Image (cartoon, rainbow, N blue to C red):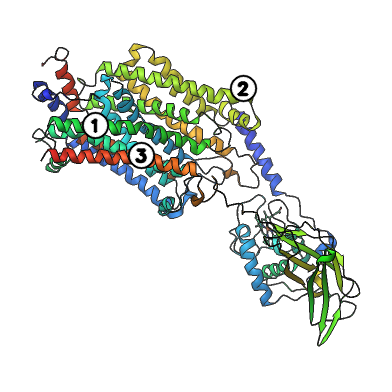
Amino acid sequence: MILKSTFFVVLNFVAVVLLAQTTPWEVPADRSAKLSTAAFTDQNRNTGKDLYQTNCKSCHGDPGKNNVIKLVPPPPDPATTQLQQNSDGSLHYKISEGRGAMPAFKNIMSSADIWNVISYLRSYNKDYRQLLAVKPAYGGEVFDKVDLKLTADPTHNAIVAQLTGLKGSLVKPIAGLEVKLFAKRYFGNLMVDKPMDTDTEGKALFSYPKNLPGDASGKVSLIAQLSNEELFGLVRTESTMAIGLPTDRPPLNEPRALWNVVQKTPIWLLVTYLASVLIVWGFIVLALLKLRAIFKLGE
Amino acid sequence: MASEVNTKFLQDKRLDRIASDILRPVGVDRSFLIWMSSLSMLLFVCLYAYYIQLDKGLIVTGMRDYVSWGMYISNFVFFVATSLVGMLISSVLGMMGYKWVKPIGRIAEIIAVAFSAVAGIVIVSDMGRPERLAYVFMFGRIQSPILWDVTVVVTYMTLSILLYIFTMIPDMAISRGRIGHTPVWLQKTYEFLSFNFQHKPEQYKILLKAVRILLIMIVPTAFAIHTVTSWLFAVTTRPGWDSTIFGPYFLTGAFVAGSAAVIILMFVVRNSYKLSRYITVELFDKMGKLLFLVSIVYFYFNLNEYLVPAYKMKTFEARHIIELFVGEHAFMFWSVQLLGLIIPMILLLFKSMRKPVPMFIIAIVVLIASWFKRLLIVVPTMEAPFLPKQNVPDAWMLYHPTIVESAITVGTITMAVMIISVLMKLFPVIPIWEIAEEESAHPDQHPVE
């Protein structure tokens, strides 16, 4: 018994020492050197704060209050040096990729939003001075606005994404950039075709399968997005088109089922439950009526 | 219960003796006041523990993410289980015509009332936000065994209370003019609870009919209450709970706990109330045999419940079995099986062990063991989820009940003891009219004195 408990104490000690020395989180050099192209503004910080509250606070707590959730290894409080010593790029990498209990956010937030969260995290570091990435220019051209538009070409089973830049009254097609097309599904987005580069007319051509399931009237919600977020920020467009197969499936929660809401109780169960309750309580009421009869007889 | 009452017992001289014997201890005396104030003090301390829990939330218990059912739910199962004996003694044995259960029918009913009422309170102790109890009725789903459980607990409690009151009506009427030694408010209560009963034959006829209805209704309800409680576990796929025999396994276990509770109260009534004339040595012998019978049935279900998975040793079941047989919970497991089941069964085979004192000791051990048995049903399974436990502090891995939690549990037991004390001390604990009727029907066996 004593031997056993000593053994466990030693084991525990070893475990604690091992855990305390969790392997350092390696970040590839190119990723740790990465910087945001945009200067952090108050607006970035506010967006970042909101994102932090919904996505991070449950584990990392309120910055500076050290009320983090008890996990092993623990998620650091954002105000600590452990977190702040990371370069901007390292933060971006760690938040994007995750490790262990720290979720990967690359499929949950856009890269721009991750930068917004970082700008919020940095507001708890007085010594932080932001370094900006040199903004990669597109062939030396600067636009006021970049536009992505989707049109359907059902006869060829094709969707065309048109990328244009606007400068004053000038409208110019943007060539040679990668665009991705997705169809919105229940849980996440389904990529349609491969990522495509825009041609000299600024057009990327996607072909979609004929049997792509749509809603009851065959409508599909499509999302097109410019892969490179650093050139012009997030360029993205959504549009709903009748290119899919009409599918009229009843919603999953339509039928009566054990797992459904109370209004969708299976009939057999409803009847059994109500009948049992009514019968037993009916007899209880009957017994009480007899009590009344006894009382009356005694008067 | 006979279908007709021969009211000639009312003229029998024996009635006076029986009534004065049974009504003598009734009333508020010094020792009762001291007993009740000690219990109240204990309850007060436990209520303070509950205040702490209300204030801070369930974090003051030992329950964490993995073990979210601990001592409270085990305690709940224990309370529901023990309360079932009311149905076993009054309904099943009584309706089968066993006359020997007459003197203890009311004791069994008292246990049923107290334990089912407190069972409802125990469930609330497991809620961090008790004010949301109403949500069960507002948003409850008929598909959920939890709603069934709430329904049957309430129904069983109602039936038990009614049965207790109904079978006491003639006694309340008999007690008129015989309880001058008790406080006026108690006499008024008796008057109220006699519901104008004048011992008219028609009144007896209606009363017997009403009691019969209740006795019959309480059988399926009692089966339902504990089967549904077992389903709270058995409808999951978790090792240790995923069992098709959980209903009968719980039910037979309930009879063991309940019979033990009845024996304990019988001993108290016999000695403190000096009612050994009615709670006889033979009655202990009979209850000893009953305890043996229910124990051996329960033993049989235990054998099935543990041997079958232990033979197959499926991955997750095996982990559970090993935890119980040789692991973390082995000491408690074997203590409970030996002290609460196997040794009592062997002892009860001997007539000398079915005497009041040894029976009293055996019953106490059995009842305590049956409390721990419920803990063994609830906690080990919770500690062994299917997915590995990762990235959490050590304190979450295993369940260690806290002082606050234990105090609240002691509080619920105190409450049950208080209800039992009040019912036993302020009302006739043995049915006067049933005994008197029995004795006057068999005058040769019961000399006038």
Please determine whether, in this image, residue A212 is positioned above or below residue B170.
below
Quarter-of-image position of residue B386? top right
Residue that mark 3 sits on: A279
Q: Which residue is pictured at 50% across the width and 47% down the height?
A: A265
Please determine whether, in this image, residue A250 is positioned above or below residue B25.
below
Residue B326 visible in this rendered orientation of the protein: yes
| Chain identity of mark 2 | B
Q: Position of residue B380 (x, y in %)?
A: 55, 35
Which residue is most to the bottom?
A: A169
- Foreground mark, 2 or 1? 1
Nearer the observer, A260 or B418: A260
Characterize the local packing of mark 2: few (<14), some (14-19) or many (20 or more) Cα atoms within 10 angstroms.
few
Q: Position of residue B264 (x, y in %)?
A: 31, 26
Residue that mark 2 sits on: B311
Q: Position of residue B39 (x, y in %)?
A: 29, 40
Does the CB distance between marks 3 and 2 fall below 8 Å? no
Callout 1 amino acid? Lys
Spatial CA distance of label 3 from label 2 is 43 Å
The mark that comes first in sequence, 2 or 1, is: 1
Callout 3 amino acid? Ile
User: Could you tell me which quadrant the C terminus of chain A lies in?
Assistant: top left
Q: Report helix, strand or loop for mark 1.
A: helix
Q: Report helix, strand or loop for mark 3.
A: helix
